[in-house]
Image (cartoon, rainbow, N blue to C red):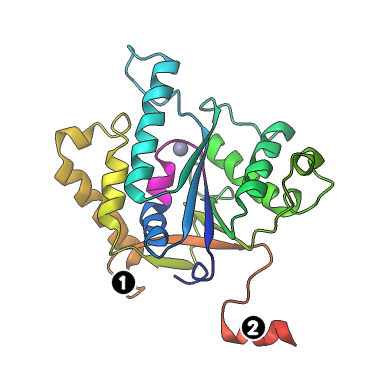
């Protein structure tokens, strides 16, 4: 797992329940199996994602929280944090930035995964764009510098430097993670989001086949059967490769 091997703690910042499983479910499960700690942080509660007219926002949010907890349990995720913003209501304001900075300072992840907020050639949901932008801002410089959100330090937290950010849902992937061993966990975790994938109830086999085909397309030309792909967004670059290590030591 190029770029992800040296990390021990991983934070996944997720716009809506199910986006994490779609973007990095296989990678998250693999990281867990390798003994790393993975925490999911949900920015919104997904309370608009239904065509079922009998469901209120509150009822849908409750259902989706339960689905997300079940999906995270399947993947082996250590903790799920719910910031509980309304679906479609995620703002890049100071209060929301502070919430994310707080959890980064509390959890101290080496690596943060989120969706690419800079996608140019196809549609990106506003909450996804905002979640990505909030994440990179929270990582650098806000979580790092003690004079930003000093109230966190008064509460006993310390500043924190995240080493790397990786984006899923990107047009320019440069990191491919082999998820051959964990793809079935990803399919099961995604299927836990029943309110979003009614086709699972109709034909679970077809749902799994569709996921496998997608992962196989991601892997094409990269020497693996199934892959998830990411774009590494350099924050301060851990010297992962030997030649980089030598360069940084000079
Ligand atoms: Zn979403």
Residue positioned 71% across, 82% down in the render: 248
Residue 77 lies, in percent from the top left, at 42, 49
Height in image: 51 above or below 165? above
Quadrant of the frame with the N terminus: bottom left
| Residue 187 in the figure: left or right of residue 43 | left
The answer to which image quadrant residue 144 occupies is bottom right
Task: Report the span colored magenta.
Answer: 13-23
Q: Nearer the viewer, mark 2 or mark 1?
A: 2
Q: Earlier in the sequence, mark 2 or mark 1?
A: 1
| Label 2 CB-ligand 1 distance < 8 A | no
Residue 88 lies, in percent from the top left, at 53, 27
Q: Secondary structure at mark 2?
A: helix
Residue 167 lies, in percent from the top left, at 53, 55
Residue positioned 67% across, 48% down in the render: 105
| Residue 150 in the figure: left or right of residue 177 | right
Residue 17 painted magenta: yes
- The front one of 4 and 167 is 4
Residue 93 painted magenta: no
Which residue does the numbered mark 2 point to in the structure image?
245
Which residue does the numbered mark 1 point to in the structure image?
224
Q: Residue furthest right?
A: 147
Residue positioned 59% across, 31% down in the render: 90
């Amino acid at each position: 797992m190029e770029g992800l091997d040296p990390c021990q703690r991983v934070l996944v910042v997720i716009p809506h329940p199910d986006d994490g499983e779609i973007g990095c479910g296989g990678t998250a499960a693999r990281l867990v199996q390798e003994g790393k700690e993975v925490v999911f942080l949900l920015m919104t509660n997904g309370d608009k994602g239904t065509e079922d007219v009998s469901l209120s926002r509150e009822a849908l949010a409750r259902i989706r929280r339960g689905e997300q907890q079940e999906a995270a349990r399947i993947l082996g995720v250590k903790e799920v944090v719910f910031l509980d913003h309304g679906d479609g209501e995620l703002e890049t304001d100071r209060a929301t930035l502070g919430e994310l900075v707080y959890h980064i300072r509390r959890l101290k992840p080496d690596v943060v995964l989120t969706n690419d907020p800079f996608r140019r050639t196809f549609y990106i949901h506003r909450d996804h764009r905002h979640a990505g932008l909030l994440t990179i801002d929270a990582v650098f410089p806000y979580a790092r510098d003690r004079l930003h959100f000093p109230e966190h330090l008064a509460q006993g937290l310390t500043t924190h430097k995240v080493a790397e950010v990786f984006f899923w849902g990107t047009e320019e992937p440069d990191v491919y993670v082999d998820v051959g061993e964990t793809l079935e966990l990803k399919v099961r975790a995604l299927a836990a989001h029943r309110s979003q994938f009614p086709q699972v109830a109709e034909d679970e086999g077809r749902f799994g086949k569709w996921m496998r085909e997608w992962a196989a397309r991601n892997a094409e030309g990269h020497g693996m059967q199934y892959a998830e792909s990411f774009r590494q967004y350099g924050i301060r670059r851990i010297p992962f490769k030997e030649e980089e290590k030598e360069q940084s030591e000079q």
